[in-house]
Amino acid sequence: MRRLALLVVWICLASLPVWADYGLSNVVEKQIDRGQLPEQQPQAVPDEMTPPAPAQTPEKEPLSKVLEEAAPQYKKTVFYPYTIHISSWQSKKDALSRFRQTARNLDPVFITKIDLGATGIWYRVDYGAFRSQREAASRMSDLQAKGIMDTESFIGSAVPYAIELGVFPDKAGASGEGGRLGQKGVVTYIVKESESAFRLLAGAYPGQKSAAPAFEDLTAMGLQPKIVKR
């Protein structure tokens, strides 16, 4: 009986390495199998999930072009090259004082900042826009006879140019803009070209060079002036 027990123990001990080798080989095979699995490729994102490209904002047209296209269109058929000069001043303050006095009885009265060359920059208090010298002279004589205009007033040579600050479809629009500019010290007047075109102007000039100082002032204020025929 003792011998039988020893025999059983010996058989078990002898078979133990075999079972160990079987378990180890099984583990190794499984590890090798995992390593040989094909790598998972990243899944493609469906087209509908692709974020859309940002929409391009259309370039805005320059403000000057927009305003020009929006301005009422008209055909220039009548010109106003003559104006009555009421007084001239080297001080803008004095010119404004005289303007306020005169504007109580006359319309349109305006101020022309003008470069007179050798004599420098002057501020003229002017009245009206006339098609001919005869028309201007007749109006001046009538106003002087009524005591509304001083005898020092004169017509002088043609001043066919002005600085245009806008064209409006009605007089109310032009007057509103003129009032806004008046608060900034810019004195304007209105010339009616048609029933739907009212031009807002500043000054009366014999040529474009004489209008340069006033033109530069208006540009510096952020406005978009144009030197044009009246």
Image: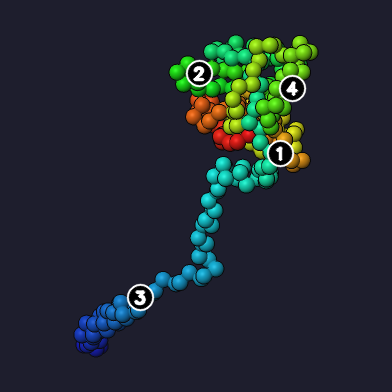
**Sequence-first disc among 2 and 4:** 2
Question: What coloring was used for the rendering?
Answer: rainbow
Q: Which mark is residue 193?
A: 1
Q: Name the residue under label 4.
A: 139
The amino acid type, in three-letter code, at marker 1 is: Glu
Figure quadrant of residue 8: bottom left
Location of mark 3 (residue): 39
Left or right relative to 50: residue 9: left
**Separation of residues labelled 3 and 1 (CA atoms):** 82 Å
Mark 4 is on which residue type? Arg
Of badges 1 and 4, nearer the viewer stands 4
Is residue 200 visible to us here? no
- On residue 121, the disc is 2
Q: Mark 1 to mark 4: distance in Å?
A: 21 Å
- In the image, residue 108 sits, relative to residue 146, either above or below, namely below
Quadrant for the C terminus, please.
top right
> Which mark lies nearer to you, 3 or 1?
1
